[in-house]
Image (spheres, rainbow, N blue to C red):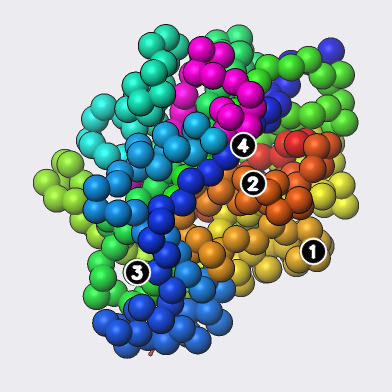
Amino acid sequence: MAGRSVVVGVGHYLPERVVPNSEFEKTLDTTDEWIRTRSGIERRHFAADDESTSDLATKAAEAALADAGLTVDDIDAIIVATSTADLTFPSAATMVQARLGMTKGFAFDVQAVCAGFVFALSNANALILSGQAKRVLVIGAETFSRIMDWTDRSTCVLFGDGAGALVLELQEGEGTSDDRGILATDLNSDGRYKDLLYVDGGVSTQSTGHLRMQGNQVFRHAVEKLAKTAETALGAAGLGSADVDWIVPHQANIRIIQGTAKKMGLPMENVVVTVQDHGNTSAASIPLALSVGKQRGQIKRGDLIVTEAIGGGLAWGAVVLRW
Ligand code: ACO
């Protein structure tokens, strides 16, 4: 017998405003065709001026709780993966906690940029397996529209806002790879690559700053590191690519998604793709894709899923779970 962190609920929230690629043609030297062919993105959602990351996170959390048939009274901890919290402090997670009416347990944020949800899932799993929590609400939520340089065509067309959430619950498994729940995780970072992807401001430098990215350099690292972390996590679970029903990748660029699947020896029929509709929503992209994948009827109970993500840091990792 072995404890497992099993997904018992999933949900997401996307802001109302949808921005098609054509809108950028009005203000930038770019085209819908360039954005589609280089990134796979067709549209993205942007939060309203009075909508913040914790608003998006709260709505996604409510959807996941409803899907699980649970209330906040059943939850021991909340983790929000985000790089765009409402305030410097308190954490977005404690703001979500208050909004949900939860007055016990604990809540905190995890910051690993686009890899944030994978890091948050791994942390939630560790809390559950070490007996510190039985049920954890794990949320990825971002408002990257707030850190875009709208004059930089090489970045501002790529990102979007949104939120997704999972409820993880301690259940007993057999201790084999047939168990439902998180089977293995693999986390990595290498701070030497800071200059490839960062925000040129922050509290300690007294500004908000804008996202800066050497896209082609990040691209170069992405496929190789993502395929390797996915294979490492699968190996730790005693599994291989052939066992995978769904890759649910961080949705940054369709060419990275295709390249990683190919390197893993899997066809695109085994990949949940939402980048065309959401753009890159950073830490929100994986839970958004899990929720949409379930809604579409792609992801079913018992399916073996590998999630993988890379982002600023660089930080990257993968989680293998059975749905
Ligand atoms: N419209 C038209 N032309 C553009 C645009 C645009 N929106 N943006 C850039 N270009 C131009 C460039 O200026 C360049 O022109 P030049 O050759 O005259 O200098 C040309 O297009 C090619 O630029 P590249 O950057 O080499 O294009 P590439 O094919 O690499 O695609 C992209 C760019 C989409 C950014 C890609 O590199 C990418 O997706 N990179 C990875 C992004 C990513 O995965 N990020 C990780 C997670 S994000 C996070 O952690 C926050």
Residue position for label 3: 156
Residue position for label 4: 10
Relative to 94, say whether 222 is above or below: below
- The amino acid type found where label 4 is placed reads Val
Precedes in sequence: disc 2 or disc 4: 4
Along the line of sight, the residue nearer the viewer: 190 or 284: 284
Q: CA distance from mark 2 to mark 1?
A: 15 Å
Residue that appears at 78% across and 58% down:
270
- Tell whether circle 3 marks a residue whose Cβ is less than 8 angstroms from ligand 1: yes
Precedes in sequence: disc 4 or disc 3: 4
Callout 4–callout 3 Cβ contact below 8 Å: no
Q: Secondary structure at mark 3?
A: helix
Relative to 25, say whether 92 is above or below: above
Residue that appears at 17% across and 41% down:
203
Instruction: Say which mark, if any, is on residue 63.
Output: none
Residue position for label 1: 269
Q: CA distance from mark 4 to mark 3?
A: 29 Å
Q: Can you see residue 246?
A: no
Bounds of the magenta segment:
64-84
- The amino acid type found where label 1 is placed reads Glu
Callout 3–callout 2 Cβ contact below 8 Å: no
- The amino acid type found where label 2 is placed reads Leu
